[in-house]
Image (tube, rainbow, N blue to C red):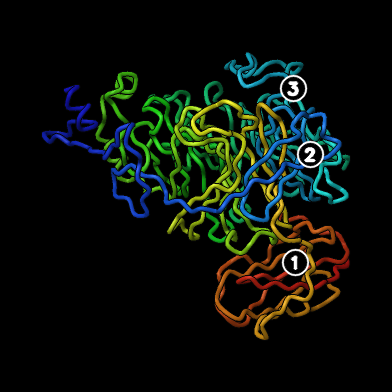
Amino acid sequence: MKSMISAMGPVCLLGASLVLSLSVRPSQAQSIPRLADPQPGQIFLTPQIDLNLQPVPLVVPEQYASAGIEGRELSLPPGFKVNVFAAGEPLVGPRLMAWSPDGVLHVANMKVRGGEWSPNVDSDSPPGEDQLYAQVLALPDADGNGVADEMRVAADRLWFPNSIQFHGDYLYVADMHQVLRLRDVDDDGFYEQREVIVPDLPTGHHRTRTIQIDRQRQKFYLSIGSSCDLCRETDERRATIMEFNLDGTDGRVFARGLRNAIGLAIHPLTGQLWGTFNGHDKEGQSLPPERIDIIRDGAFLGWPVAHGFRSWVDFSISQYRDAIFPISAQDSMDVTRVPRPVAQVEAHMAPMGIEFYRGDGLPEQYLGTAFIALRGGSNSPAPGQRVVALFAGPNGENAQVGDFLRGFQPRAGSSSGVWGKPVGLTTDARGHLYVSSDWINHLILRVSPPQPTAVEEEGDPLPADFALEQNFPNPFNGGTTIHYVLPAAGVANLVVYNLSGQRIKTLESAWRLAGNGVAHWDGRDDGGTIAASGVYVYRLESRGYATTRKLLMLR
């Protein structure tokens, strides 16, 4: 039996019939093919696109010179620049980031008083209140110069927070053992009112929890990693994405078979949930490829019996065979419904944050692109510690992937010289990409697009059939209507900004036919909060054209 397993993959007895599941498995010496249309059982990587990366110096502002990262160089596509947005203490393990309703960048400061393998973190029980040191930090940039003015504590007494989200008046924090909902009741920037809305989450191995709010459906999703590398779980919440109401009630398993999903994001056009998945450890340097995919309700993504597009785990590995066998009829049926991944990158890259670009500043080719942070790579033959851009249709079709930001790891397949580990990603309304590094150097980088990104641009010739009309009524109180005209079918982005260039409300972000379009604004921001009285800018972009107008809201 063992020789058959080694040669042909898992075997299970279903009644009187013997079912064999085969995988096309390359040897370690054989490169994994890049396939645009893989078949079930094929192990593959996504086709690659060359973004022509060029070396650029890392600009270190004077206030962060003491962080010891001067003289560094990174690689980016032509015209992009990069500077340190924040670095050094009190940043200790900055992970996933989010923007508050007033446009201030916040980050989960996860490793305060710990490190990657702190006894407090590895414990199955949270420490006492006097030993909860982790935080959420606010990093305001009031003067808009692309550098954090300060780093101040917005929330504290956390154990191991990986992810944060804002919605309305609330700051949501996904800690290892619970989900918190906090409010800043006195408007001083510190969120002192605390409510545990999801208690008693499983702790220990795969300790990070990621939260993603779906504002359209008024739900949030929470990733909970497995308790092991590969095993049969006894807690049904493990290796899943769970769905909750915004108050934490009615929790249910939304998708399963995800060993450890760190990055979650809502696609701006389709509203679908996407994620990044970390694969198992013991199949060598090249297997299994890491998955980036759409996560659908009721989906099974393979773990602990399969990976990729229905490729079975190598059960000739004794630890895996002992942990999983016997293979059941349900296992076999589950594997037959594992969907083809949208994309796969090299093994052991440890994909972290995923961010769909929806700002104004990047070149048109990046509209709708997903950026993915790859934290790992030291145990892979491919270069790690980088950010990649995933180009795909709204439903994941025709995917291509290209390196976007490199330079944290000078030599492929080596941990020598690594000076940063990319984890969190976010973009602002003006097209800047922010990248957090949670180890070796604790910092947040800001990547600037090739051309100026001022909200108002004048002098660009526009076709006669591309138009953005003045809103009516203007000034307005309860709501206003905006008409526009597109010269050709394409993605229309109509966004309201404040005069500091911070995005307030996305009115349109979808494929539209050529001709007349109309949008309405009720005066609320993307979080549902009523915006303040004042002058705002609304901007229309489509197929490389852009124009802006101003409006006045009076309350």
In the picture, the quarter occupied by the C terminus is: bottom right
Three-letter amino acid code at the position of disc 2: Val
Identity of the residue drawn at 76% across and 72% down? 548
Q: Taking 457 as reference, is 526 above or below it? A: above
Which circle's residue, 3 or 1, is located before the other in the chain? 3
List x then y, in percent, for residue 453. 75, 61
Identity of the residue drawn at 67% across and 56% down? 79
Q: Residues within 10 Å of mark 1 (few under 14, many from 20)?
A: some
- How far apart are the alpha carbons under marks 2 and 3? 28 Å
Tell which tag, 1 or 2, sits nearer the viewer: 2
Identity of the residue drawn at 33% across and 42% down? 43
Tell me, yes or no, whether the two marked residues, 1 and 2, touch with CB atoms within 8 Å.
no
List x then y, in percent, for residue 485. 65, 80
Q: Say which of 475 and 82 sits in front.
A: 82
Q: Quadrant of residue 331?
A: top left
Q: Residues within 10 Å of mark 3 (few under 14, many from 20)?
A: some
Report the side of 238 relative to 134 (left or right).
left
Q: Taking 164 as reference, is 491 above or below it? A: below
Q: Secondary structure at mark 2?
A: loop
Q: Which residue is mark 2?
A: 60
